[in-house]
Amino acid sequence: MTKNILSEYTQEYVNIVIGRRLSGKSFLAIDIARRIINRDVYLFTSDISISIDEIASLFKLHNIVLIFDTNTISSEELRYIADNKEILEQNNIHTIVFLNSSDRLLISIPNTMLSCNFFTIENVFDNKEFEDLNDKLSSIGLINIKKNKTILDNIYLYKEQYTTGLSYELGQLTEALTEIDLKILILSASSDKV
């Protein structure tokens, strides 16, 4: 999905990504922000609310990408973005807005946004993702994910499989794990060392 969005987001100034809860929208937003290297990217995560005045200030910048994760903007801010496509065009500003498929914000999408790009995230892995992920999991000795299960169901299956015998809850961690820490934790857990 990242590749699809990265190859198409510059075709429109407003892009909408729709997915169910826990379908990976926030991960996708972060992944896209990390991969755009030829311009400044402003990522607003779901724990941030942004106002029309703040968006108006951002619209004064040039050659940027604004990424709004779920719950960062209301219908008023979405309408403001849609109503100001001319400014986006003039300043070469591209926006990517993530919405929950059950979000009432979808109902309020203005008619002026019907010409924007729409992307849909499924809450299951496609065949290539499924095969690639299972190849990587197998290569480090972890069980494969189940094809006909949602991403959330597979997470629960992993939790049941790999958290037996843990002497602490993951919620007790006081610092964010680095990528290396996480790899060590997964490898240790798969070898019953945790």
Image: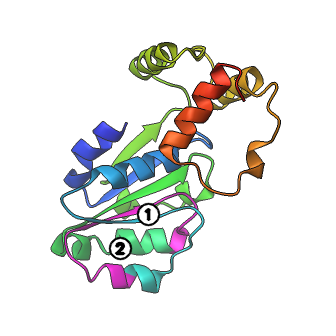
- SS at badge 1: loop
**Quick check: marks 1 and 2 in contact, CB under 8 Å?**
yes
Front residue of 104 and 13: 13
Front residue of 17 and 188: 188
**How far from the left and from the top, in percent, is residue 133?**
46, 21
Q: Residue at x 26, y 61 (%)?
A: 13
- SS at badge 2: helix
Q: Residue at x 44, y 71 (%)?
A: 79
Q: Which residue is mark 2?
A: 83
Q: Residues within 10 Å of mark 2 (few under 14, many from 20)?
A: some
Q: CA distance from mark 1 to mark 2?
A: 9 Å
Magenta segment includes 78: no
Label disc, if present, on residue 174 of the rendered structure = none
Left of 7 or right of it: where is 20?
A: right
Q: Residues within 10 Å of mark 1 (few under 14, many from 20)?
A: some
Quadrant location of the N terminus?
Answer: top left
Left of 23 or right of it: where is 4?
A: left
Q: Amino acid at mark 2?
A: Asp
Front residue of 5 and 107: 5
Q: Which residue is mark 1?
A: 110
User: Magenta residues, as a range?
Assistant: 56-76
Q: Residue at x 63, y 20 (%)?
A: 149
Left of 172 or right of it: where is 11?
A: left
Q: Amino acid at mark 1?
A: Pro
